[in-house]
Structures are given as structure tokens and as C-alpha cells.
Image (cartoon, rainbow, N blue to C red):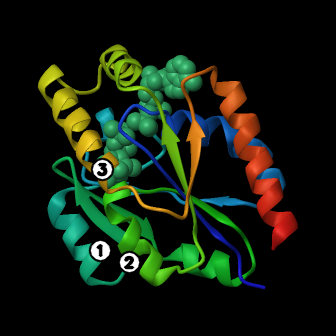
């Protein structure tokens, strides 16, 4: 049986990386795989286990068909390696850090993907982004503006996961959600 693509998305600062890191060990124990993203961000500022490449290298990889999914946002290019298709074919679930703006395109390629939207109040988001200190205040405001814009476009078929509270609570809810998904498969 084909594995399921779990497409985690949410505004910048909502906690996607933190959640992926915290849930990784228990989910891997259930056979779930995690895709390592390729990003045109300098290695020093990559806050996740991603491969940083130059824009030219990204384009070359994209031209070679190295990505199952790829998109541009926040002035960066992001790619999900094609190997996720091998994992899915082998029946393994795959969790990826996706983009809200690319969800519809992703659904076209993976019609039965499970979309999970991580949500946090805007005031908390701003606070977390400032505390993280990776982007300039101007870049943070741009990301918050993008979130407001995308919020208006959010459609049905997406499970909302709130991360305004402590991270361990969100991890438990994610594990529960994925257990339910497996039971219903
Ligand atoms: N539930 C939480 N409670 C408090 N701080 C959190 C929580 N989740 C994430 N954070 C913090 O918020 C900031 C943004 O989280 P991050 O995982 O980098 O978000 P994203 O990957 O969605 O941009 C980080 O500094 C992280 O430590
Ligand atoms: O369409 P959107 O939902 O706005 O997403 C755009 C991009 O931003 C996030 O990446 P990234 O981890 O680089 O940004 P972040 O760390 O600020 O969340 C997300 O994973 C997408 O790759």
C-alpha cells in the first residue's frame, strides 16, 4: 500500500521546525520518514536540517528533476527531494515542511495528502519571530503580511493544529492525529 504524504504548513514562526524536530523520534519509530529540504539559504542561517545551495545549483537540480515538489517564497527557493516518491511507494508515510502557497499544486501531485496547518495568534507569532532573531524586523513584517493574505485564501480539507500553547502539547496532538489517520487508512 502507498504511504501518505503529510504536508505540514503554517506561518513563519508558527513552530513547524520545532514541531518536526520534537516529533521526529516518535514518528520515525512508527516508520514515518522526514524529507530534508533543499533551500537557497546560506548554511549559517538554515535553522533546520536543510541543504543550503546557491540559486544556480537549485536551478540545475530542478532542471534535472531532482525535486518532487518545489516552490519560491520569501525570496527563497525550496525543494523536496524526489526520493520521497520511493518512500511513499514503499508504503512509508512522509512528513514534509510545506508551503501554504504551494498546497494546491502539491495536491495535484499527491491527491490524498494530509494537510496540517499549524496556527498561532499574530501577536505571539511576531514575538516568536523577533525572539528567534533570524530575520530583520522588516522581513518579519513582510512574513506576517503574507500570512494575513494567505489566511484569507485558506480552504477546506485542512486540519488545524494550534501551537499557541506549550510545544509538548502540540507534539501529542500531532501524534494522536497521525494515529487516527493510520487507523482510518
Ligand atoms: N509551542 C511553542 N511555545 C513557545 N515557543 C515556541 C513554540 N513553538 C515554537 N516556538 C519558538 O518559536 C520560534 C519559531 O519556531 P520555528 O520552529 O522556527 O517556526 P517555523 O519553522 O514555523 O518558522 C522558535 O524560536 C521556537 O523555539
Ligand atoms: O507559503 P508559505 O506557507 O508562506 O510558506 C513559504 C515558505 O516559508 C516556510 O519556509 P521557511 O521554513 O523557510 O520559513 P520560516 O522558517 O520562516 O517558516 C514554508 O515552509 C515555505 O517553504
Q: Is residue 46 visible?
A: no
Q: Residue at x 20, y 71 (%)?
A: 59
Q: Is residue 151 visible?
A: yes
Separation (CA) of disc 1 from disc 2: 5 Å
Q: Nearer the viewer, mark 2 or mark 3?
A: 3
Position of residue 34 measured from the top left corner of the image (x, y, whole percent):
61, 57
Q: Is residue 2 above or below residue 174?
A: below
Pointer 3 local density, CA inside 10 Å: few below 14, some 14–19, many at least 20: few
Q: Is residue 41 above or below residue 61?
A: above
Q: Which residue is tagged 1?
A: 61
Q: Nearer the viewer, mark 3 or mark 1?
A: 3
- Position of 106 with respect to 152 (left or right) is right
Quadrant of the snapshot with the N terminus: bottom right
Q: Which residue is tagged 3?
A: 152
Separation (CA) of disc 2 from disc 3: 32 Å
- Position of 60 with respect to 138 (left or right) is right
Q: Which residue is tagged 2?
A: 66
**What kind of element bears circle 1?**
helix
Pointer 1 local density, CA inside 10 Å: few below 14, some 14–19, many at least 20: some
**What kind of element bears circle 2?**
loop
- C-beta proximity under 8 Å, tags 2 and 3: no
**What kind of element bears circle 3?**
helix
Instruction: Indicate which disc, 2 or 3, sits on the residue closer to the N terminus.
Output: 2
- C-beta proximity under 8 Å, tags 1 and 2: yes
- Position of 42 with respect to 142 (left or right) is right
Q: Residue at x 27, y 55 (%)?
A: 53
Position of residue 26 measured from the top left corner of the image (x, y, whole percent):
79, 44
Instruction: Indicate which disc, 3 or 1, sits on the residue closer to the N terminus.
Output: 1
Amino acid at each position: 500500500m502507498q504511504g501518505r504524504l503529510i504536508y505540514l504548513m503554517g506561518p513563519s514562526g508558527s513552530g513547524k521546525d520545532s514541531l518536526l524536530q520534537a516529533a521526529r523520534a516518535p514518528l520515525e519509530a512508527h516508520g514515518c520518514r522526514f524529507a530534508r529540504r533543499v533551500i537557497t539559504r546560506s548554511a549559517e542561517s538554515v535553522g533546520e536540517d536543510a541543504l543550503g545551495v546557491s540559486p544556480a545549483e537549485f536551478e540545475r537540480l530542478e532542471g534535472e528533476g531532482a525535486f518532487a515538489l518545489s516552490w519560491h517564497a520569501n525570496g527563497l527557493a525550496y525543494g523536496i527531494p524526489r526520493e520521497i516518491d520511493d518512500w511513499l511507494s514503499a508504503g512509508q508515510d512522509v512528513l514534509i515542511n510545506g508551503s501554504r502557497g504551494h498546497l494546491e499544486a502539491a495536491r495535484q501531485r499527491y491527491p490524498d495528502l494530509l494537510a496540517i496547518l499549524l496556527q498561532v495568534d499574530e501577536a505571539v507569532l511576531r514575538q516568536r519571530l523577533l525572539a528567534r532573531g533570524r530575520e530583520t524586523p522588516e522581513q518579519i513584517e513582510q512574513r506576517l503580511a503574507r500570512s494575513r493574505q494567505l489566511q484569507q485564501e485558506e480552504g477546506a480539507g485542512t486540519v488545524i493544529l494550534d501551537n499557541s500553547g506549550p510545544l509538548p502539547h502540540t507534539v501529542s496532538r500531532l501524534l494522536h492525529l497521525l494515529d487516527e489517520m493510520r487507523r482510518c487508512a
